[in-house]
């Protein structure tokens, strides 16, 4: 692949950054259990008109693995610092899964930095409520058994990717793709980084269980959203929510709840698609993404 790989220091952490193309920038933020590579189809498919940037979160892949900072707020600070370090002018920003929880925090805190926001199959608002997410509950309540299971190369990460992918789209992940994610997942420190992120949502950096979504993500007033309420931050830029209709990890009903709470947001549901729309159906995903970003080309 003809992508440019660089190391960029942001918020005190060296981040592995991958770039392609020229034109208005879009920064892509990955989720679990993946890395920058999850946006390979966007790096190749949109780079004729846009500068596409993808990177490894702290602790993941080739990025530094510091002892601390594995929470969505710190990772949002990383994103803001990375945009500044790269000298990007009002990029669009896209987040999938945990990346979709990180991105709105960055946009909320730096409203003039970004032009447009895209959220893809992400845990937000009541969707992040631990009791509504069986796998977050398992990670936080079945340790050390779950820690041992997650370290089994014969099971992970391919079993998660296969299970969260709609049955008709299994071909979307080649053996090369699975091998890439396996090598990243089993790099020293990577699994520990993911576990720290999941557990920070359950307990918080202090170890005390959070009572409100505001405490977890939007710590700045005037946002005040409880676990039982959906998210609706004071974000003014155009926003698109993309969701796989057959997502087993974050069911599509959660997308409809978000839309009801945030009516200004555009919603695009991809049928016959699981948790990874940008990888399972890259052509349809990229077409909708291009349409949403096309005003930036004028």
Image (cartoon, grey):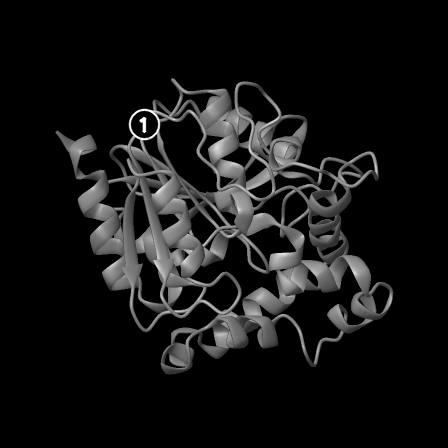
Residue 123 at what x, y percent from top left? 53, 50
Q: Which residue is depicted at the point 30% across and 39% down?
A: 265
Residue 181 at what x, y percent from top left? 57, 65
Residue 253 seen from this side: yes
Indicate left or right for 168 with 210 as reference: left
Quarter occupied by the N terminus: bottom left
Give the SS element for disc 1: loop
Indicate left or right for 84 with 60 as reference: left
Camera-side residue: 120 or 296?
A: 120
Please identify the residue farthest to the front as the structure is shown: 228
Camera-side residue: 283 or 255?
A: 255
Q: Which residue is depicted at the point 26% across and 48% down?
A: 289
Question: For residue 58, what is the image quadrant?
Answer: top right
Q: Which residue is depicted at the point 55% across and 54% down?
A: 35
Count numbered badges in the picture.
Answer: 1
Residue 98 seen from this side: no
Quarter occupied by the C terminus: top left
Indicate left or right for 269 with 151 as reference: left
What residue does disc 1 label?
237
10 Å neighbourhood of mark 1: few (<14), some, or many (≥20)?
some
Question: For residue 281, what is the image quadrant?
Answer: bottom left
Please identify the residue farthest to the right as the structure is shown: 144
Residue 261 at what x, y percent from top left? 39, 40
Camera-side residue: 212 or 101?
A: 212
Camera-side residue: 184 or 127?
A: 127
Residue 45 at what x, y percent from top left? 27, 55
Reply above or below: 262 against 136. Answer: above
């Amino acid at each position: 692949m003809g992508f440019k790989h660089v190391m960029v220091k942001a918020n005190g952490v060296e981040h592995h950054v991958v770039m392609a193309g020229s034109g208005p920038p879009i920064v892509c933020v990955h989720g679990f259990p993946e890395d920058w590579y999850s946006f390979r189809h966007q790096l190749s498919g949109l780079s004729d008109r846009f500068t596409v940037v993808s990177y490894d979160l702290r602790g993941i892949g080739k990025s530094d693995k510091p002892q601390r900072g594995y929470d969505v707020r710190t990772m949002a600070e990383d994103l803001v610092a990375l945009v500044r370090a790269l000298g990007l002018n009002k990029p669009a920003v896209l987040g999938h899964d945990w990346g979709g929880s990180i991105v709105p925090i960055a946009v909320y805190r730096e409203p003039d930095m970004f032009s447009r926001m895209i959220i893809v199959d992400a845990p937000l608002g009541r969707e992040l409520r631990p009791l509504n997410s069986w796998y977050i509950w398992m990670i936080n309540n079945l340790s050390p058994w779950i820690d041992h299971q997650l370290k089994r190369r014969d099971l992970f990460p391919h079993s998660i990717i296969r299970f969260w992918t709609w049955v008709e789209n299994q071909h979307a992940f080649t053996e090369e793709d699975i091998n890439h994610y396996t090598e990243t997942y089993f790099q020293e420190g990577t699994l520990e980084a993911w576990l720290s992120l999941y557990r920070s949502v359950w307990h918080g950096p202090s170890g005390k269980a959070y009572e409100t979504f505001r405490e977890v993500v939007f710590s700045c007033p005037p946002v005040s959203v409880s676990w039982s309420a959906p998210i609706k931050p004071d974000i003014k830029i155009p926003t698109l929510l993309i969701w796989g209709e057959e997502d087993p990890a974050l069911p599509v009903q959660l997308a409809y709840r978000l839309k009801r709470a945030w009516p200004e947001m555009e919603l695009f549901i991809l049928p016959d698609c699981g948790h990874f729309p940008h990888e399972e159906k890259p052509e349809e995903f990229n077409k909708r993404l291009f349409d949403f970003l096309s005003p930036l080309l004028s």
